[in-house]
Structures are given as C-alpha cells and as structure tokens.
Amino acid sequence: MGEFLVKPAMQPKALSPSRVARTVAQLAFAGLLPLLCAAQPPPPGAGATAAVVDFKKLLPVLPEPPAGWVSDPAEGSTDDLGETQITTVHRDYSKGDGENVPTTSISILDSVASPEYLESTIAAWNSDTADADGYTKSLTIEGMPGFETYENDGKHGSLWLVVAKRYILQIETTAQEPGELQEWLKRIDLKKLAEIK
C-alpha cells in the first residue's frame, strides 16, 4: 500500500519588531486624512485654527529631478473639509524604464490645522529597531524631529520630517540603498519650506 504524506499547514511568519514599527509608522501617516477630517473645532473663545498655505506656495519646494532621473509634474491641492483645511503637494521621480527601477516620491502636508495629529505623530516616532529585515529610527535633523524606516526587501525606504512645527515632509524610495533617503532630503530647501506661511 502506498503511504500518504501530509504536509504540515504553513505557519504564518512572525513579524520582526522592525517590520511592526515600520508598519505602524506607515499606517500613522496614511491615517492622517481621516484624523484631519474629524478634527474638532476649537472650544469657544479659543480662536480659530491657523489657516493652511495655498498649495501653489509649496510646489517650488519640490526639487527638480537629478541627472539621469525624470519626474512627473508637481501637483497639489488645498481643500476645505468643513471644520478643517488640508494642503498637500506631491511629486514622483523615476530613473529608467520598466519594472523595479529606482523611484522616489516626495510629499509635503501642511498640518497646521491639526496640531493634535502632529503631536501624536511625533510621539509615535519614538522607536528604534534593527534586524535582518531592515530598520526604523527616530532622528533629528537641524533641530527638526523625524523618523526613518528601511526594508531590505524591495529596498523600500521612508523618511518623515516635521518642518517649522507644521509641515510633514515625506520621502519614499524604492530600489535604492538606505543612504539615498538623506541624499534626496539634501535636494529640498528646508529653510525655504520653513519660511512659507
């Protein structure tokens, strides 16, 4: 008689601490819009929240593509969501054609209308981990709080930086080494961004 081989059920792979931290950081940033939409009006007598800047003022901060790279035109919007406003700008960059080519996305969000979200985001960045899958680390650049993550799989990196206690700058890279996050950051005039009101 033949024997039947029963293969054990595949067990889910345990998530490493750094992957968990990276996922939490990405979800925190991705969850911004619902939180901004649910922002509460100020209590009576507290005054109105500060107005966000028009997106057209932020577009020039997004850098031109470096040599050998191409980019989509910069885009953005300023939207009134009832109790709050949101301004975002974004630009995508790529090097070469086809799949698995290096890409970078840069976004800036004016969070002045939601200081509670900004505070909770910065508090969530208090996590440093490193393992075979990648790393997460909090950082400070020119006195500004930030957070960086990198996944070895896909060479995917993300860097967030709070500029002038209102702008959340996000840089995402794929198919690039971790040091490229800082190189992209150097292409952005942080002083110019901080001065925009």
Image (spheres, grey):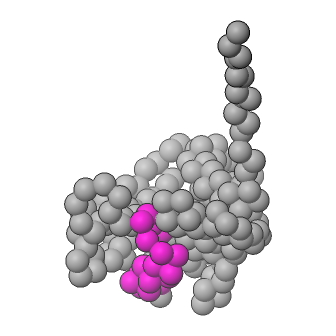
x and y percentages locating residue 189 in the rendered image: 42, 85
> Magenta segment, which residues?
171-190
Left or right: 154 as drawn, with respect to 15: left
Examine the rendered structure and indicate whether residue 82 appears above or below residue 42.
Answer: above
In the picture, measured across the screen, residue 162 lies left or right of residue 44, that is left
Using the rendered view, name the quadrant where residue 61 is placed.
bottom left
> Viewer-proximal residue, 139 or 119?
139
Relative image position of residue 126 (x, y in whole percent): 77, 70
Query: 40 above or below 17?
Result: above
Q: Nearer the viewer, residue 111 or 182?
A: 182
Is 62 on the left-hand or right-hand side of 190?
left
Counting the numbered discs, the total is: 0
Q: Specify whether residue 178 is painted magenta.
A: yes
The residue at 61%/71% (across/down) is 148
The quadrant holding residue 26 is bottom right
* Visible residue check, residue 185: no
x 67%, y 80%: residue? 139
Q: Quadrant of residue 193?
A: bottom left
Which is nearer the eye, 181 or 53? 181
Q: Quadrant of the N terminus?
A: top right
Is residue 68 rendered magenta in the image?
no
Task: Please state if 62 lies on the left or on the right of 34 as rendered.
Answer: left
- Residue 60 visible to an observer of this rendering: yes
- Which residue appears farthest toward the front when viewing the image? 1
Q: Residue at x 70, y 75 (%)?
A: 138
